[in-house]
Amino acid sequence: MSAPPPGSFLDTGDNAWQLTSATLVGLQTMVGLVMIYGGVVKKKWAINSAFMVMYAYAAVMLVWVICGYRFSFGKWLIPFWGRPGTTLGAGFESTQANLYAAYITPAYGMATMVFFQGVFAAITVALIAGALLGRMSFLAWMLFVPLWLVCSYSVCAFSIWGGGFLYKWGVLDYSGGYVIHVSSGTAGHVAAAWLGPRLLRDRERFPPNNVIFVMAGAGMLWLGWNGFNGGDPYSANVDAGVAVLNTNIAAATSMLVWILLDYVFFGKPSVIGAVQGIITGLVVITPGAGFIPGWAAIVEGVCSGSVPWFTMMVLARKVPLFKIVDDVLGVVHTHAVTGLLGGILTGVFTLRDLAASFPTFRPSNGLVQGGGGQFGKQIVGGLFVVGWNIVLTSLIMLFLKLIVPLRMSDAHLEIGDDAAHGEEAYALWGEGMTYDESQHGWSGPEEKSAHAERVVKEGGSPEGMAAGGEHTRLKSAAMV
């Protein structure tokens, strides 16, 4: 008997939906997070914050195809890691997708599966950056990304998704409440503890520089989550529709609850608060998006709009674990706390019939339907992810501390983007506070004279312009 022709396994509808879902998740990172991180920080950190996200996406993609995918979804090596290898061979990319240890074979090629899983890995690492903004050395970040991907993310991904010991035991994580959000929230908070706080002046006053950007980025995150959760049945099936609808129900409910709490306790609704509510709603539904009925999505939205609000607005000011660590965007609240909440609620509301449509071992009812065993498994799975990320992230930060500075110098922290990258987010020649000759050059003596006059008016000196004008730069930083 002859071998089947290449691509005979292909379902074009499934393949199209999977690639669309993957692209939506990629846009969540490269557009959504770039806009949120670039807009929510102080103006002097806009470029650095957005650039950390863009770098993470690129670095993860390369490491992913070299070794990350096989560690996370390859054939069984040990209970929490797949057998290493690349995904770069033409023979591998064109074969039918196969999560070997999980016994899942979707109706499209391995290239589609590798890309789909790769964008999830990328957004996970990018989320960690939210805790580290405004002081981490970019070189240290460049090294942190591949190390954390290989040593931490791949372990959690294989253990829960790829056919590892938690997968076989029956821990449920539909789309990454544990693998992505608890991992990134825990790792971000731990890394921030090792990194140390921002400058005191930045901690005390860190206003967003572009709230409209933040809103637009949040919108991209929200709609992109249709691919984030809708793509995880690995098929364009009924369960994908259930996941997408539940995602939007939870996000809407959570946002409204967060706004209501802001209104009650602070007297006015906050756009930044609304964005936090959207994100927590999206995160809480992620572990069980296709496992629970719509009414449970509303309940989860109420929980995600209130519990993280309480930990962020109340406990963060009182509990040393939260108070001491300078987690800039509060990823421990929006991702770790909320992801753990969502995972536990999955053990409460899961319906066996819905879970059975998703490839996993031993699906069972949640606590509401009398399935107490699933509730216990969800707690154990969440604790494993938290513990692993605390240990591995600490080891990575300690290792990096031995070979490179983790932080920028205090002088560079005063300046921000211009010191880190030689660029400013909104400065135009004639409007910006600095003018770096090495970056822009001089058009003529008239422009140089005009710049000197402006420096003097601002309290500097013409001599301070030389070699980029450090005096002017420091004055600029003080005014941001």
Image (cartoon, rainbow, N blue to C red):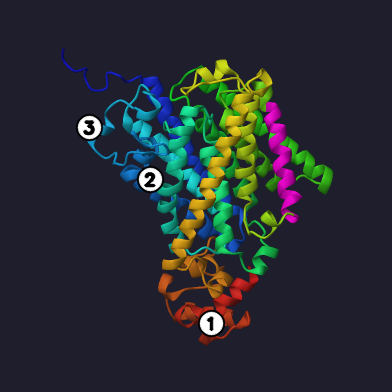
Q: Main secondary structure of the magenta part?
A: helix
Question: Which portion, as a residue range, is magenta?
Answer: 298-318
> In the rendered image of this protein, does residue 37 appear above or below residue 170?
below
Q: Which mark is residue 363?
A: none
Residue at image point 47% right, 24% down: 233
Q: Which residue is mark 1?
A: 452
Which residue is the extreme one toward the left?
Answer: 1
Please tell me whether mark 3 sits on a helix, a strand or a loop: helix
Q: Amino acid at mark 1?
A: Ala
Q: Which residue is mark 3?
A: 91
Front in this rendered view, residue 211 or 308: 308
Please tell me whether mark 1 sits on a helix, a strand or a loop: helix
Q: Which residue is mark 2?
A: 61
Quarter of the image containing the C terminus?
A: bottom right
Q: How busy is the neighbourhood of tag 1: few (under 14 within 10 Å), some, or many (20 plus)?
A: some
| Residue 397 relative to residue 258: left or right | left
